[in-house]
Image (cartoon, helix red, strand yellow):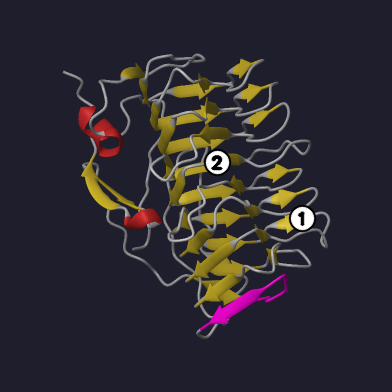
Amino acid sequence: MYEERSAWNDYFSGTSQPQVINQQTTRQTPSNECVHVLNCLFQSVTATSNGGAVYCGTSVTYLLVESSSFFSCKTSANYGGAICFYNMDNGQSVLHTVCGNDCNSGTAHGQHIGIFLSNTALTKNYVNYSSFSRCLNEQRNEVLAIYYGKVCCPSLNVSMNRCNSYSAIWFYSYGDSNSVTCSLSYSSTVDNSAVSSTCIYFSSTGVKSEIKSCNILRNTQGNLGSYGTIYAYKNLVIEDSCILDNKATYIFYQVDSSYSITLSNCTVDSFSYSGRLTTRNTVTKSFILGLNHMSTHNCHSEYDSAGTLTAVPYTSTRSSSKRVSLCTCGMFHYQSKISDLFSLTYIFMITFIHSY
């Protein structure tokens, strides 16, 4: 019996038994309807087509990539130096405990990850408890390209990358005026640099997006007056987050004046904005979040200070038999079991618990 079935059912219950790609080190191009990439280490894998290490096309409907690392993987094609999944007909995707280091694509977008899925309210497009760092391709754009469906990204670490524009994440999500369809929570976006502009980009499709309990620190852009650190087309609510030491003329950039960016109970050192910015409660430079992230040998993360501010000590709870996933998109919340994360001896110790 497929022993990782419980982990698969956490996300894709009711589907057929997946093709399991386990402990592989060479480029994978699976074609089954259901695919589970598990406990793999891809190092210095290169390709001339999309997806340097893993590529899934329209024959794949459900993809789970779990407990796997991608080091110095590259493609000379458009998308995904590490992973590309392109199924805009009916694709759904979950990345969980993925480590990416020094991956890039040759052209276009998604230096580490390019995910392009069906744009419906029921489409899962999740990236959970994962770390992506040290992409240093100044000719290309964002580290993560997350396109369409309901986007949920809890406990991400996207740090120390340098791109042309959008130095961290480009979000597209399903447009629903009644609910949040794109959520970034308990995450750190730190020390990223754009040759041109912008760190985090929320596109025109998602009507309601949110940033909750995140640290956004020391991100820079070469063209200070172009766009801003956080760029949004539609409504964006930023709550309980720390936004400090970022270098841009506008930290908050709202394109469409009929929508707004709303700050609530945040630590900021600048209210500079273009478009509309609304503040709720007292917004002062008074705290920084103590966040724990997935941490491996190549995805190290300690981002709990900015200037003279340090985080209030937090108590982390580690368990190799539990996984807690929190998504506010559509009020989706669950706690589930997971088996031992790594069976490969050459994948290093992993820790991941957010401060709540």
The kind of residue tagged 1 is Gln
Badge 1 density bin: few <14, some 14–19, many ≥20, Cα 10 Å: many
Residue 344: x %, y % from top left: 35, 24
Q: The disc labelled 2 sits on which kind of residue?
A: Ile
Among numbered discs 1 and 2, the one appearing first in the sequence: 2
Residue found at x 59% / y 34%: 112
Secondary structure of residue under mark 2: strand
Q: Residue 309 has which mark?
A: none
Rounded to the nearest whole Å, what is the CA distance between mark 1 and mark 2? 21 Å
Determine whether 325 is above or below 125 in the image: below
Give the residue at x 60% y 55%: 190
Q: Which of 128 and 287 is in front in this view?
A: 128
- Residue 37 position, x and y percent, is 39, 24
Q: Magenta span covers which residues?
A: 269-280
In-front residue for pair 93/88: 88
Residue 333 part of the magenta-drawn span = no
Identify the residue under disc 1: 221
**Disc 1 secondary structure class:** strand
Relative to 37, is 29 above or below? above
Quadrant showing the C terminus: bottom left
Q: Can residue 239 be seen in this view?
A: yes
Image coords of residue 106 (percent x, y): 72, 26
Q: Is residue 252 left or right of residue 265?
A: right
